[in-house]
């Protein structure tokens, strides 16, 4: 009897050990599928000049209780802001970004590649930068292209100029380049509490998430791009009733772009037209639960909500 009981015990322990090992492997696999960071993105480093004075960029890289630096607000962007042709060894940060980052980042391109988490479905997508004071979704659409009709995916005949190929004002005689649609901003106008911030990309589920405590409220977000529905979905939720307040707006990449906020439809609309006739429209449908949504001049204000959902569609002609 003793031998039989010992065998049962050993057999049971072996099964438990195997089960535990399986759970551990699965847990490690789940962790391996996630890339996370507990540092906020420097959302200003991407250098969208049109965002100046529209959002709370002063909280970039800062925590609740920190003293924001006195950024040298300039009336117009410096002529040396984007010196792309000087190579990666050049320091071409503008005055404001240099102050916010203490000159730590000499190349915005590297930060754009390193700090953003990507969400997309093959046609539309966004570089997601969860910052301390605001979240930034740099939107993209695969067909939004400057330049002329090239008759294919490459400049096979050599009849198109490559000069200024990334310029949105390239005409029919230029090859052109992919153009950014614009930025969707969720602006909290308050920094995250130190030690509360977490952002991650869940690769096997196609999700980008974040969590941060602001003014005592934990605010979590989830973003993804649906392939069947061809929209980007962003959902924010607060851990206490009526704890979510923010300002929602598009920031343009071109001075000619137009933005509108319609109270009846609760939609933000961004419209673009390039010199080659290419048109693009992005529409963000806003749904607020447990709070109020108030339109402004090209933006919406969310007050005292439980949760917020933004469904964005992007199309070109």
Image (cartoon, rainbow, N blue to C red):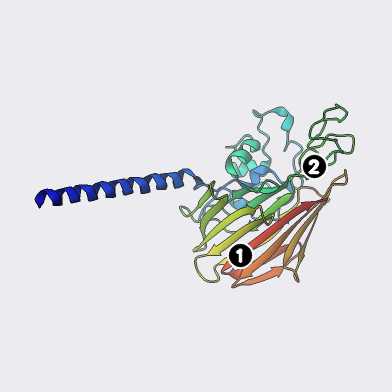
Task: From this view, report whether residue 140 is shown above or below residue 159.
Answer: below
Say whether residue 15 is left or right of residue 180: left
Visible residue check, residue 188: no
Question: Which SS class for mark 2?
Answer: loop
Percent position of residue 103, x then y: 60, 37
Distance between the alpha carbons at the discs numbered 1 and 2: 32 Å
Say which residue appears at 55% left-offset and 53% top-offset: 209
Percent position of residue 202, x then y: 53, 48
Residue extending farthest to the top is: 158
Say which residue appears at 62% left-offset and 58% top-offset: 234
Identify which residue, 151 or 82, lies in the foreground: 151
Percent position of residue 287, x then y: 65, 67
Q: How many dots with numbers?
A: 2
Specify which label sits upstream in the sequence, 1 or 2.
Answer: 2
Q: Nearer the viewer, mark 1 or mark 2?
A: 2
Q: Which mark is residue 160?
A: none
Residue placed under numbered mark 2 in the picture: 145
Question: Which SS class for mark 1?
Answer: strand
Residue placed under numbered mark 1 in the picture: 308
Say which residue appears at 68% left-offset and 46% top-offset: 122
Q: Mark 1, residues whose alpha carbon is within 10 Å: few (<14), some, or many (≥20)?
A: many
């Amino acid at each position: 009897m003793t031998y039989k009981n010992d065998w049962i015990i050993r057999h049971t322990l072996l099964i438990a050990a195997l089960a535990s090992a399986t759970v551990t492997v699965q847990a490690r696999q789940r962790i391996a599928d996630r890339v996370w960071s507990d540092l906020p993105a420097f959302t200003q480093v991407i250098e969208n000049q049109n965002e100046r004075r529209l959002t709370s960029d002063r909280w970039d890289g800062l925590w609740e209780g920190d003293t924001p630096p006195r950024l040298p607000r300039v009336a117009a962007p410096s002529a040396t802001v984007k010196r792309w042709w000087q190579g990666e060894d050049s320091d071409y940060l503008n005055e404001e970004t240099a102050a916010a980052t203490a000159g730590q980042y000499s190349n915005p391109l590297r930060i754009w590649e390193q700090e953003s988490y990507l969400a997309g479905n093959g046609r539309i997508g966004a570089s997601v930068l969860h910052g301390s004071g605001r979240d930034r979704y740099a939107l993209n659409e695969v067909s939004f292209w400057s330049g002329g009709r090239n008759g294919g995916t490459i400049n096979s005949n050599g009849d198109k100029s490559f000069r200024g190929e990334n310029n949105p004002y390239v005409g029919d005689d230029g090859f052109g380049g992919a153009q950014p649609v614009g930025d969707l901003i969720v602006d909290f106008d308050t920094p995250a509490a130190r030690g509360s911030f977490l952002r991650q990309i869940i690769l096997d589920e196609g999700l980008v998430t974040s969590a941060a405590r602001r003014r005592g409220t934990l605010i979590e977000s989830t973003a993804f791009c649906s392939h069947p529905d061809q929209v980007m979905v962003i959902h924010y939720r607060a851990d206490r009733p009526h704890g979510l307040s923010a300002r929602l707006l598009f920031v343009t990449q071109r001075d000619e772009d137009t933005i509108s906020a319609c109270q009846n439809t609760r939609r933000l609309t961004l419209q673009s037209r390039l010199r080659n006739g290419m048109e693009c429209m992005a529409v963000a449908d806003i749904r607020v639960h447990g709070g109020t949504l108030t339109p402004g001049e090209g933006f919406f204000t969310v007050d005292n909500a439980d949760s917020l959902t933004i469904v964005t569609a992007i199309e070109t002609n």
